[in-house]
Amino acid sequence: MNPSLFIEYIDKYFRLVIGKITEKINDKKKEQQLLHKTMLTEEYSADLTWGSTELNTSVVAADVVAMDSSLPLKKRDKISNASGVIPKIGIKFSKGEKAISDINVMRARGADETTVVGKIFDDAPKAIKGVDVRKEIMFLQALSTGVTLVPDEENVGTGVRADFGYKAENTFHATTAKWGEANAVPQDDVQQLFDKAQEDGNSITLVMLSKKYFNLFRNSKQGKLLAANYNKQVITNENTLPVPSRETMLEALADEYGATFRIVDSSFRIEKPDGSRVSVKPWAEANVVGLPSENVGRLVYGTLAEETNPVAGVNYQKSGSHILVAKYSKTDPLKEFTTAQALALPVIDGVDSIYILHADSTGEELSVNPTSLAFPKSGSSKTFDVHYDGDASELTIEADEEWLSVTLSGNKVTVKAAANTEAERTGKVTVTDKEDNSVEVSVTQAAGNA
């Protein structure tokens, strides 16, 4: 590795630029606040292990890689199982010869120094935010399910998986019908969490749920009645009650349960191994989670080996407590690199006081939603949700036709259908648990010879 091609600017501005970026990212008023920054307490781990007392638009999330892996350029490398060891989160950006030449032309023409500095360091905020986004994805997965992982479809090889031991006795289901169905009773369903917490001598002060399931609640008969009673409306016909506004519904819920309800609607862009970018919503959409407080755990971090053993020719700066930003160059071909990396893992504590409602299930141990998928003749990818009370990684997913391929990621199954050049065809995907219980999703694909 060689020093940055713009070393005079690095020496003068690197520390100041990283400080400003960090300040902006952590400013609640200016940036979208990531929940892990407010709901987790940072904790340093000298031995790089973790445990629990109980047990801008185009930012791309960083990969999670094993300790002995290199940082994948554009997120391209193998990761190994790092369960129990804090994973390394890293992201790398590069400027090619054209971008380097453009900066040199700007300097030769006497461009304003602020403009030149902006071009030289424009990858730094994306790199830092990319690491933060990956931590947020892992956190929202962990909080909504009790397990966090980076699935194979996002990275080549196996992923990091940490199970925080959510209690089966604190897990509930819709009592009468799934939310969204005509006879659903979401108010009664949520009450289960509060009743169990009271029985356990705990209290729920914060309930988190997805935007979709919040809307299903307020569109339900019980949701409309709850809001109408809160507004002290005279109810003459329950069937003609209007859907309450978001604000009214949140106020009515807080009044009814004595807890704050928070809607989670975070969506992030990730880059797959083939270079394609997709949006992901890490919160398990149908899960309603009751929490004892705003603080739910720790962001455990360690010291990178590169921080204590810096590489010659590389310039480093620290963003916050644990993100290490580096700039350097390489030849053949000539490139300028910006990297950000960290050893960090969100850890959920106090699981005895966390309660979960699966609003898309009435108690079946294994179920799927939807139960059928229809594909166009050109082929495409579609997903269905799996509800399973056990360890989802132990499920077996099989397709009965060669033109179908399936992958499991968390509680979602992705089904890919190849293009069809013949008559309409059908198939099925079977999900089987370790007790040999199974459910099926029927698949149809339009004719390709029409």
Image (tube, rainbow, N blue to C red):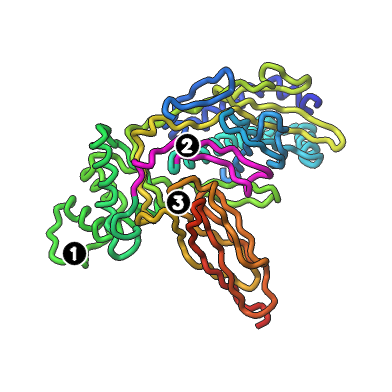
* Residue occupied by mark 1: 238
Q: Which residue is mark 3?
A: 388
Q: Looking at the image, is 141 positioned above or below residue 4? A: below
Q: Amino acid at mark 1?
A: Glu
* Residue 161 belongs to the span the image colors magenta: yes
In the image, 450: left or right of 231? right
Residue 174 image offset from top left, x and y in percent: 32, 54
Mark 2 neighbour class, 10 Å CA radius: few under 14, some 14 to 19, many 20 or more: some
Q: Secondary structure at mark 2?
A: loop
Inspect the image, locate mark 3, and give the three-letter code of the amino acid beneath it.
Tyr
For marks 2 and 1 on the same chain, the one whose residue lies earlier in the sequence? 2
Within 10 Å of the Cα at label 1, are there few (<14), some (14-19), or many (20+) other Cα atoms? few
Determine the image quadrant of residue 313.
Answer: top right
Give the residues in magenta.
146-172
Q: Position of residue 99 (x, y in %)?
A: 76, 40
Residue 388 in view of the camera: yes
Residue 208 on image: x %, y %: 37, 43
CA–CA distance between discs 2 and 1?
39 Å
Q: Is residue 339 left or right of residue 356?
A: right
Q: Earlier in the sequence, mark 3 or mark 2?
A: 2
Query: Where does label 2 land, which residue?
Result: 34
Who comes first in sequence, dot 1 or dot 3? 1
The one nearer the camera, 384 or 89, is: 384
State if disc 3 and disc 1 touch (CB < 8 Å): no
Q: Secondary structure at mark 3?
A: strand
Camera-nearest residue between 150 and 272: 150
Figure quadrant of residue 289: top left
Residues 3 and 77: in front is 77
- Res. 130 image quadrant: top right
The quadrant of the picture occupied by the N terminus is: top right
